[in-house]
Amino acid sequence: MKNIIFVSLLGLVLTNCKREENTPVEPLMETVDSTAVVNVKGSFTGIGGESVSGTARIITAGEKYSLVLDQFSTNNGPDLHVYLSKQAMPKDFIDLGSLKSTRGTQVYEINGKPDLAEYKYALIHCQQFNHLFGSALLSEIN
């Protein structure tokens, strides 16, 4: 009898903890200010079996900073966020919000003026499961 209850509870837990894919999949083509200056740029690589590609760049237009994801693509997840991080892992970061789509060109405003010598990584991270999908090391443009 205990085994039947255990198996029933295990089944209930497993069905309630399934990984839902909540990020929109329609490709975006957000516009980027043509007068903006590119400060840093890097290419995404997937982590832990996740598929993430495209480029990340931080631009400035006047006093406004933005992170732009170009030709971006990732597999889906339940709670994907975009971070600007001091480390390759999400420990000291600025959360720029939920990932708008799994594909396309996307622009994320950055509040204030980040120290680009410190914030060297763009990350795609699943908050719900604390799982890093991908990262891009941002380097100065020469």
Image (cartoon, rainbow, N blue to C red):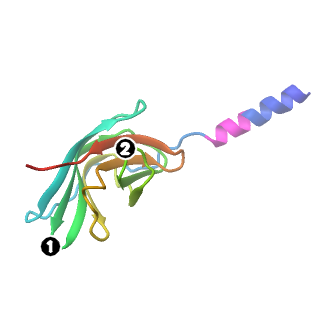
Secondary structure beneath label 1: loop
Give, as a single range, the part of the protein colored magenta: 11-17
Task: Find residue 129 and report its horizontal and vertical position in percent.
Answer: 54, 44
In the rendered structure, the answer to whether residue 50 lies left or right of residue 119 reads right
Whether residue 10 sits left or right of residue 62 in the image: it is right
Q: Residue furthest bottom?
A: 63
Is 99 covered by the magenta stretch? no
| Residue located at (89% from left, 29% from top) | 2
Q: Residue at x 42, y 49 (%)?
A: 23
* Location of residue 30 by image quarter: bottom left
Q: Earlier in the sequence, mark 2 or mark 1?
A: 1
Q: Main secondary structure of the magenta part?
A: helix
Q: Where is residue 41 drawn, in percent x and y?
A: 19, 49
Badge 1 local density, few (<14 within 10 Å), some, or many (20+)? few
Looking at numbered disc 2 in the image, what kind of residue is underneath it?
A: Ala
**Numbered tag placed on residue 62 in the rendering:** 1
